[in-house]
Each structure stands twice: as structure tokens, then as C-alpha cells.
């Protein structure tokens, strides 16, 4: 159904690539219509104005525009805390298909970055103020575009799996096989082939799962989901990765690169993960089709 945007107010312009980032950041204000995001209602108060600023400063194509037409850097809300230990980096990058990047702070005062935002010197300063970033963790090849630049800025180690190494040939740490590897105390890399050959989950503190594009929370189904229409390597391999994870992984926060984030009780999340593994095991390969993703 066509839903028009009000003239003279906040707009989503024609550069929108329908990546879902803005809809996540400003629910009820930005929705999908005719294969793109549109502003369906103007903000009524300062809190709603902030939601649109979050969407605008995260949008990878800079398509979300304020009434003035100019996005003021002074209004940039990122990094944005999800809880005491995890921040959204915002500034989603077009070269990573708009993937969400996270900063995970550690109790010793350090921090790790999971996937990367587009480069911003101002954002780098604000992130560095939250903790000494020791590691930049790439979940897979599609999110590797800015990895070396961010790692060098922080003097950090860049991580990727050997299956996707050609996307980051100068990585400092290269994972191999399927065995879990400790990144820093409390943070584990778990190879998770499927979306790509070298996909990796990063798990922290039995609380956080940074899932890259392996799985996400779907608003359409109100459950965990895989994007089987954009599984580049093997849906069968992804099903095997999920089957291995059942009963082994414990976390509350699901923090994907694409798709919705969610927080559930760890026992409930474990049940949902088991259900996802069973559903994925019944899927057959299908042609790549971005429009088929049910966010």
C-alpha cells in the first residue's frame, strides 16, 4: 500500500535501498511501502525527534533527511548505549550493505568492536573514549570493508575466519576450523559457516550473541529467523551450524548485523534457537533474492 510522506517535514529520499536500518531505529515513524522506507508520521515531541535523528545518523545512504534538508553533525547520537556494556556505533556503511556495528566494553576498561561502521574520525574519538579498543571482530566477508582502517585507528587486532580471508587478507588473527577461540577474557569466537563459508558468531559473558548475518529476530514472525534467500554459501551448512549450537549456547541479547535485535530470558532464547535449528534443517537452497527477506 502506498503511504506518502508529508511535504516539508522529515523525509526518506530516493537513495533508500530498503535495508531496514531506519525502520529499526524509528519504529512507528518510518515504515516500509512499495519496496522502500517512508516517513509515515512526523515527530510529535522531542523523544520522537531523537528517534528520527538516530535513524538519520545510522542510515547507510543518508536517505533520512530533516526538514532543513541538512543533517547537523552536532545532533549525532552515536555511540548509543543498548545497556551498560554494549553500544550501537551507528553510521552504518554502504560498503557493508548497511550492517550494524557494535562496541562491547569490557570490565578491564578495554573494548572490542564487532563489525564496522563507515569511517568517521569524530565517531572514532567518541568510541575511543569508551574504552581502549583491542580487537575488531569481523563476522564475515560482507562486513569487512572498513576493518583495517578501524583496527589501525585503535591499534587493534583485526579478526576474520580463513573461509572469508580474501575479504581481509591483512587480518591479524585468522580463525580456522569449527572450534571456539577466546578473543579476550569473556569473549569467544565461534565459527558458524552457512551465510558465508567463514561466518563467525562472537559470544560474550553468556549474555551477548553477535550473530552477523547468520540469524536475527524477525518482526514479521516474532521469532528467530535466518535470511535463507541471501544465504550465499549453504543453507544446509547453516542448518548444521545451528544444530551444533543447540544446547551449547547461552545468551540473552541477540545482536545481528542485519535484522532486528532482541533480548529474551536465556532459557527462552535457547528454546527459540532449538526451534530455529529445526526449521532451518527443513529448508532447501533457493536463489538469492533480497526482496524475499521477512524483516
Image (cartoon, rainbow, N blue to C red):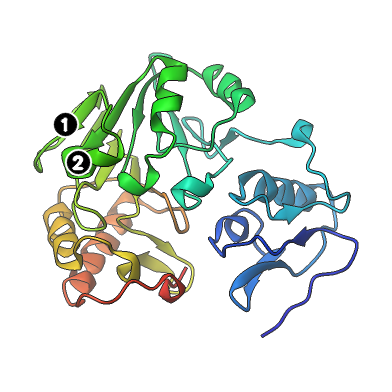
Q: Position of residue 123 (x, y in %)?
A: 60, 27
Q: Position of residue 281 (x, y in %)?
A: 16, 71
Q: Residues within 10 Å of mark 1 (few under 14, many from 20)?
A: some
Q: Residues within 10 Å of mark 2 (few under 14, many from 20)?
A: many
Closer to the camera in the image, 136 or 94: 94
Q: Secondary structure at mark 1?
A: strand
Q: Is residue 218 visible?
A: yes
Disc on res. 190: 2
Mark before the other along the chain sequence, 1 or 2? 1
Given contact means CB atoms under 8 Å apart, are the residues at marks 1 and 2 in contact? Answer: no
Closer to the camera in the image, 229 or 148: 148
Look at the picture and state if 18 lies above or below 136: below
Look at the picture and state if 39 lies above or below 165: below
Look at the picture and state if 52 lies above or below 91: below
Viewed as shown, does residue 44 lie left or right of 168? right
Residue at label 1?
Answer: 181
Residue at the location (57% across, 40% down)?
A: 90
Amino acid at each position: 500500500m502506498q503511504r506518502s510522506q508529508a511535504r516539508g517535514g522529515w523525509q526518506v529520499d530516493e537513495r533508500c535501498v530498503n535495508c531496514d536500518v531506519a525502520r529499526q531505529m524509528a519504529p512507528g515513524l518510518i515504515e516500509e511501502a512499495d519496496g522502500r522506507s517512508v516517513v509515515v508520521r512526523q515527530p510529535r515531541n522531542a523523544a520522537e525527534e531523537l528517534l528520527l535523528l538516530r535513524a538519520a545518523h545510522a542510515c547507510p545512504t543518508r536517505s533520512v533527511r530533516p526538514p532543513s534538508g541538512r543533517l547537523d553533525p552536532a545532533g549525532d547520537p552515536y555511540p548509543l548505549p543498548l545497556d551498560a556494556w554494549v553500544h550501537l556505533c551507528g553510521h552504518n556503511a554502504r560498503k557493508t550493505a548497511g550492517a550494524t556495528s557494535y562496541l562491547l566494553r569490557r570490565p578491564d576498561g578495554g573494548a572490542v568492536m564487532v563489525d564496522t561502521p563507515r569511517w568517521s574520525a569524530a565517531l572514532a574519538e567518541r568510541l575511543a573514549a569508551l574504552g581502549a579498543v583491542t580487537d575488531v571482530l569481523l563476522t564475515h566477508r560482507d562486513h569487512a570493508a572498513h576493518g583495517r582502517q578501524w583496527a589501525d585507528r585503535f591499534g587493534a587486532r583485526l579478526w576474520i575466519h580463513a573461509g572469508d580471508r580474501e575479504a581481509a587478507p591483512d587480518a591479524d588473527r585468522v580463525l580456522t576450523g569449527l572450534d571456539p577461540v577466546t578473543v579476550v577474557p569473556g569473549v569467544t569466537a565461534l565459527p558458524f559457516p552457512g551465510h558465508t563459508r567463514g561466518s563467525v558468531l562472537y559470544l560474550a559473558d553468556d549474555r551477548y550473541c553477535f550473530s552477523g548475518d547468520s540469524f536475527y529476530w524477525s518482526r514479521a514472525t516474532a521469532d528467530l529467523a535466518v535470511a535463507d534467500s541471501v544465504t550465499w554459501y549453504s543453507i544446509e551448512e547453516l542448518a548444521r551450524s545451528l544444530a551444533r549450537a543447540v544446547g551449547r549456547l547461552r545468551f540473552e541479547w541477540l545482536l545481528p548485523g542485519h535484522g532486528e535485535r532482541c533480548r529474551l530470558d536465556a532459557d527462552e532464547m535457547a528454546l527459540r534457537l532449538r526451534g530455529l535449528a529445526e526449521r532451518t534443517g527443513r529448508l532447501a537452497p533457493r536463489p538469492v533474492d533480497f526482496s524475499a527477506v521477512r524483516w
